[in-house]
Image (tube, coloured by chain):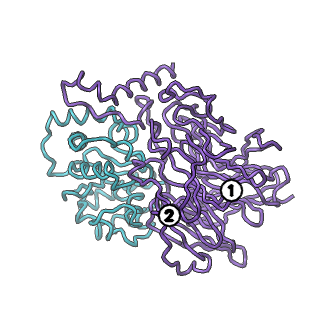
Amino acid sequence: MVRTSLLAAGFLAALATLPSLGPAFAQAPAPAPVPGWAVGRPEGSTLAPHAPRLTVTPADQVPVGALRLPPGFQAEIYAHGIPGARMMAEGPNGTIFAGSRAIGRVYAVRRNADGTTRTSIVAQGLAQPNGLVMVGNSLFVIAVNRVLRYDNIEANLDNVPAPVELTAAFGLPTEQEHAGNHHWKFASLGPDGRIYTNVGVNCNVCETDRDKFALLVSFNPDGSDRRIEARGVRNSVGMAHHPVTRELWATNNGRDWAGNDWPNDTLHRIRRSGEDHGFPFCSAGSADPQFNGGRACSEFVQPAALLGPHTAALGMRFYTGTMFPEQYRNQIFIARRGSWNRERLSGFDVAVAHLDAQGNVTRVEEFMTGLRDDANQRFLGRPVDVQVARDGALLVADEQMGAIYRITYRQ
Amino acid sequence: MTLFRLLAAALLAAAFSVSAEAADPRRGADLAAHRCVNCHGDNGRSQTPGVPSLAGQPADFITVQMILLREGIRQAPAMNPFAQGVPDQDIEDLAAFFASLPPGPPDDRAPKDEALFAAGQALAGPRHCATCHVADYGGRAQIPRVAAQREEYLVHAMTEYRDGKRAGVDTQMNSAVVGLSNAHIAALAHYLAHLD
């Protein structure tokens, strides 16, 4: 029933976008075509993205007390008062950098001798500076297509000099080319010394240039030698290389407006550069109701794991520390920001994907919960990234609260 | 001015109960009297072409836009200087104040053109405008009230979103106006401006 109406809606939307059919109905001025983002959208739905909070949340309102963790783990506030803090990177001297989206800032969090932290702003006024990666002593910030390199950053935090502009060298698609869609980046340093990032799709779901959008790509740190690492990945805002196998793994956000439970967000394992993961023809291993194009989903790389419908699986890291119990070593921690395009909330937590010796995902389990209030269908925070600190603690950035939690383990 | 203050004061209790944060609309009213109402109108209904009405806007919407203006993420040359350096608390108080004012059209609203109104209405459905702006176009949270907004301002805002000159906190609005012609935008603006 639901499937039928979705198909019907997709068919109507497809009709509306066919210019050749226009004249046949051309009595009145032709209506504007229904854009790709609205494909499949049910009549009367009132689902919309949640409001962000871009003002400072006082420390006593940060819901660290609501966090639930497995036995032996504790959570504390590591940093607060950094509105919209998102993706993290750690400098060689232990500074935690955090990017953001709407508020356009990059923050630095430094630890004081007494264990408390102090925060400062490294950069501001940038468009969605979400992609952060350290290469040696240099902080790279990717803001849509803009690539900035802050050399020797930790020595200059109190007076940050102008960065080196690498935008032209990287040549990433502009905000206009993305039509405002999925243009924010995640960045990661590969074991080969290359910078890995995403180029999200320029729509919700559509036929697109599959050499330009819905990709994972890598570059030399000077922006040269672009290589497509994976095709048909709708929008990955989290990736990391396995510390042993060196394979690239990535989270992916599934499309909207195809129902409450389809598709799942996904975890991807990239065994060889350039493989096709299927979007828009297939998502989460099955056919798209509008954009399958007659393709068999078996011809594409299958997701390594399903991460729940609309959960917004974002930042991920392999746990490489020694503080946590052995069972977490080299397992994948994943921040799930939480759903908006679903009638009942999903996500708003941190999950762990457990891998076996062959690198297959054996199970995905919740690790940090308590921010999703199922009874009242509201949320207290939105985890967007995880970072394994040098002491083995797990840092979790909560974008909604403008805070970073620190999770430790004691027997 | 006195009557306006009395009216505003009468609405404060409601604003207090709605606001989840410790925003102070009373303090916001004082701040607005010095900084905002010359352009945005004593009662939050702008009589100034190109300047939006703020009366009855969701507090989250005003807060978010003020932050984007302050940070230079949103470019509005007439407004950016006023937003520069404004502390978070002032912004939240101003937002609570304007949210507490009853919305309504500007005094100089142009007469309704039935054909243009109908054309706009016909576009709003397929474009799913009400999904986010809700059925009466009164907005919610970070999504603005567009009903009875100044018509030329609505044209300006939609054109900026369409042409990639403005970004929201998410990309829904950029996507929503993709492919609209100037005539489409004019019709939508006329329709929304005449909703009460």
Chain letter of the cyan region = B
Q: Quadrant of the C terminus of chain A?
A: bottom right
Q: Which residue is mark 2?
A: A147
Q: In the image, which is nearer the foreground, mark 1 or mark 2? A: 2
Residue A29 percent location from the top left of the image: 20, 31
Q: Identify whether B105 is placed above or below B31.
A: above
Ranked by sequence position, the earlier of labels 1 and 2 is 1
- Between B86 and A2, the residue placed more toward the observer is A2
Callout 1: helix, strand or loop? helix
Residue A343 percent location from the top left of the image: 53, 34
Mark 1 belongs to which amino acid?
Gly
Chain letter of the purple region = A
Question: Pointer 1 indicates a residue of which chain?
Answer: A
Q: Which residue is mark 1?
A: A65
Q: Residues within 10 Å of mark 2 (few under 14, many from 20)?
A: many
A67 left or right of B193 in image: right
Residue A183 percent location from the top left of the image: 47, 52
A387 left or right of B133 in image: right
Question: Pointer 2 indicates a residue of which chain?
Answer: A
Q: At 60% from the left edge and 42% from the top edge, which residue is drawn?
A: A311
Residue B96 percent location from the top left of the image: 39, 58
B158 left or right of B23 in image: left
Query: Residue at the front extreme?
Result: A225
